Image (cartoon, rainbow, N blue to C red):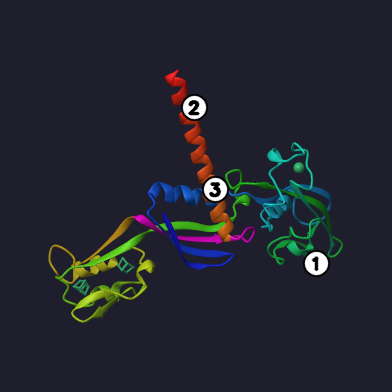
Amino acid sequence: MEIEFASLDDTLARFTLSGASPGFANAFRRAMIGEVPTLAIEDVRIYDNTSALFDEMLAHRLGLIPIKTDLTTYTTQDKCACGGAGCPGCIATFTLSVEGPKTVLSSDLIPQDPETTPVHENIPIVKLVKGQKLVIEARAVLNTGREHAKWQPTLVCGYKNYPVVTISDTCDACGMCVDECPREILAIKGKKVQVVDSKLPDCSMCRLCERACMASGIGEEPAIRISAEPDRFIFVVESDGSLPVKEIMERALSYIRDQANELENQTSEISGEEKK
Ligand code: SF4
Ligand code: SF4
Ligand SMILES: [Zn+2]
């Protein structure tokens, strides 16, 4: 199995996964979305809220604010040494005290831990008019997207099979497929159509080129055929900023490895018991 990056920074990765089964590619996608923990606001104590929003609506909005997460500092409450009671190792606390007229922004959340801040400073929470007030304390905890979408570290996480474009000798370079391709992947070179250099990963496999070729009156079979490599996948992963994309990938792969090891242990235990 091999991963080759086309681009990588903290928020966006494009890469090709080769030598993997469709099942593994999907497990990897699901692990990145649902099994990598991040911080999100879970408990909100509302001391004063004279804004136009209900307390529940406010708490919901606060929960959706992405928070920078250091997984070496925080652990989930069920695994924390405090036994789930709540301590600085499993809870990140924020306070907010704002009086109108003002739009309350994510930057108004004052973190107890200066490293654990909202990813973006300008997320609007509620608009206060003159005389309205909001005073709250919010607690963020670690959890995974499997529990609730607010803990998903990814905004975009998807893949497609690597496309294969095959052009047969019956191609007469009429150019109809070139005109039809919405992604400008094809071009006439010499007496045949060809894929433009390095454009192949952009092919959406829409097959409009095959249809155009048939419409050109070529006969029973189109000269251009679109198929997919069964064990090669193009991934696009975008982080919400709570964790770098590379860490999301690494943690998702560790999760799959741990799950596989556990399954192996359990099956060997069962087969050991059967032998007895
Ligand atoms: S399948 Fe669609 S995107 Fe791909 S080459 Fe054909 S027309 Fe273009
Ligand atoms: S439409 Fe068919 S025959 Fe015409 S250039 Fe494309 S592949 Fe060749
Ligand atoms: Zn704790």
- Front position among marks 2 and 3: 2
Quadrant in which the C terminus is drawn: top left
Position of 102 relative to 145 (above/below): below
**Main secondary structure type of the part rendered in magenta:** strand
Quadrant in which the N terminus is drawn: bottom left
The kind of residue tagged 2 is Glu
Q: Which residue is mark 1?
A: 102
The kind of residue tagged 3 is Ser
Q: Which residue is mark 3?
A: 254
Position of residue 69 measured from the top left corner of the image (x, y, whole percent) = 68, 55
- Front position among marks 1 and 2: 2
Give the residue displayed 23% in from the left and 75% down from the top. 193
Cα gap from disc 2 to disc 3, whole angstroms = 22 Å
Q: Which residues are magenta?
A: 231-244
Q: Which residue is mark 2?
A: 269
Ligand 1 - quadrant of the structure image: bottom left
Q: Is residue 53 left or right of residue 21?
A: right
Q: Nearer the viewer, residue 148 or 130?
A: 148
Q: Which of the two discs, 1 and 2, labels the residue nearer the N terminus?
A: 1
Q: Marks 3 and 2: in contact by CB < 8 Å?
A: no
Cα gap from disc 1 to disc 2, whole angstroms = 62 Å
Packing grade of label 3 (10 A; few <14, some 14-19, many >=20) is: some
- Judge whether residue 218 can be spotted in this image: yes
Does mark 1 have its CB less than 8 Å from ligand 3?
no
Position of residue 65 measured from the top left corner of the image (x, y, whole percent) = 68, 57
List the single residue furthest toward the right: 131
Q: What number of labels is visible?
A: 3
Position of residue 237 measured from the top left corner of the image (x, y, whole percent) = 51, 60
